[in-house]
Image (cartoon, rainbow, N blue to C red):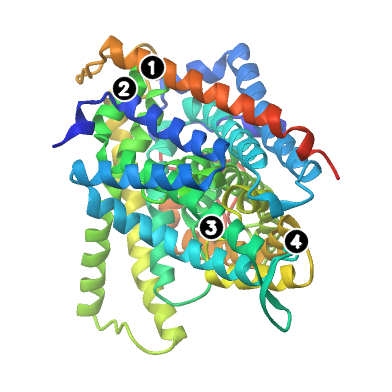
Amino acid sequence: MSQQSLILPATGTGTGPGADCAAGTAKGRRNRRLLELAGAAAIAGTYVFLVLTQPADIANGPASFSALVALGGFLLGAVLLIAAALPVLPTSTLVLMPVALVLNVVLGQLMGSTGLPFYFDAIGTVLIAVLAGPAAGAATGALSSIVWSFFNPTVLPFAAGAALIGFLAGLAARGGLFRRFYLAPVAGFVTGILAGAVSAPIAAFVFGGTAGLGTGAVVSAFRAMGDTLLAAITKQALISDPMDKAIVFAIAALLVYALPRRTTFQFPFVRRHRVLAGKVPATPEA
Amino acid sequence: MRMPYTLHPLTSLTAAGCTAVLTTAAGAWPLSLAVALAAVLLAVRAGAGQQVLVAASAVLLPLGLSLLMLHGLFFPEGRTVLAAWGPARVTAEGLAFAWESATRTGACVLVLLLFAFTVSTPDLVAALAGRGLPPQFGFVLASALTLLPAMAGRLERIRAAQEARGLVLRGGVLSRLAAVRLQMVPLVLGLIEDSGSRAEALDARGFGAPGPRTSYRQVADPPAQRRLRTTLLLITAAAVALRLVASWPAAGPA
């Protein structure tokens, strides 16, 4: 949570007076920063609490206590992050968010048709994070889980992990990791480690396992060696998530560079932080 | 019988959410099974039975099979061994754990899908905006839910156009990946271009302007349903508190 994540880009197409008004006052800025910090603290605190108090013996049945704590803490964090970011996003970014949500679903299904064993459900989130920054990425990730839960309610508890992916992708873009093509998968790999670790307690305590047969087989292997359920699922997440996110970041980078420069450079975040390789056009579109 | 439509969207949302939380807090499979059956019955009565069942089975079948394989064969904590092949041991505790987890998740998924497929999205958005949620949230929610079905048609047209230009959707992994790229780039480019013009149109109509909004859509909210919502929330809060207090010592570090 850096100071810069709160600085809003000027709107590309017609400056929204509402965004400026809300962002301009020092009080509004402080309140949003508090909300962001509270959201991040809720997610981190829930994770630490769940790991420290994990039930020693799960033979007595699924842990309702841990499930309730995981659901409550992670959803609260995601809602706080949305509340902090959403009202101050410029309209040009806001209209991109439904597009990103739909891309997450549609591209995920399209990649599924190639028969490769990955999920690829964050391509839209990473794309928005690269074009519009960490705050937009985090809000897109969390909202994406909420909208997707209308068709698949099991993704709802993972909203905090999705927000983390969007936030980290935005940070990587601002740090210039998308300027070199080979650095994007590296950023994705690191993001996958953190996102996998945060998501593992949800899979373990809310669902008692993983949703797919392939991931279930990996967890089974670790369980056969005598690991606890949380440890086995965390190890499985540390195997599949970094690989998945490295590929997702690479696909997002390919897509961003396949788009015409006229389109990508109309985003203030891309111009201001020199997110992409190549010169900024001398006269950006107003 | 289109019964759930007479409910205020927030009432059905509260009912679905509270039922899911109560089922999780109780953690007892007979209750989970009863909730799941009730959700299916209500969905059939509301005329959404097929949609709910198709969506639920797409989610629950892989999850159930995965749980059965994971806990049915490998459950190191299990003591009552029913059968064993090498490292794999079928234990009674493992099967019970898989059954408990699957029924609990199944009940929550069915209840939430019942809400999702019976609620009217415009009513829900209007009701949420009326409760002081940022109007941007309603826009993103409604826009994504209406864009999703439209997207399938758009992808279909892109594929038809690329096939007319000689795209072949067969062959090995590489040629299929190339085919995916030929469909993805026009799709993403078109969507981002569209959103640019949508932003201009929305801004011209004062979307980003500050101040209160009025809604064309008025959703009736009878006092009885408000009382019902308050009661449900209180019961759920009590159940959660009870579960947290009851399980606290057991959840401590070993």
Report how far apart the C-alphas of labels 4 and 2 lie in the structure.
48 Å
Q: Position of residue B223 (x, y in %)?
A: 29, 10
Of A86 and B128, nearer the camera is: B128
First in sequence: mark 3 vs mark 4: 4
Report how far apart the C-alphas of labels 2 and 1 lie in the structure.
6 Å
Q: Position of residue A33 (x, y in %)?
A: 65, 24
Which circle marks residue B77 in the picture? 4
Is mark 4 in CB contact (under 8 Å) with mark 1?
A: no
For image coordinates 67% across by 37% down, the residue present is A43
Report how far apart the C-alphas of labels 3 and 4 lie in the structure.
16 Å
Q: Chain of mark 4?
A: B
Q: Name above or below for residue B57 compared with residue A130.
A: below
- Residue linked to disc 1: B131
Is mark 2 in CB contact (under 8 Å) with mark 1?
A: yes
Of B236 and B85, nearer the camera is: B85
Q: Are marks 4 and 1 on the same chain?
A: yes
Give the side of residue A177 with respect to residue B153, left or right: right
> In the rendered structure, which amino acid carries the disc numbered 1?
Arg
First in sequence: mark 2 vs mark 3: 3
First in sequence: mark 4 vs mark 1: 4
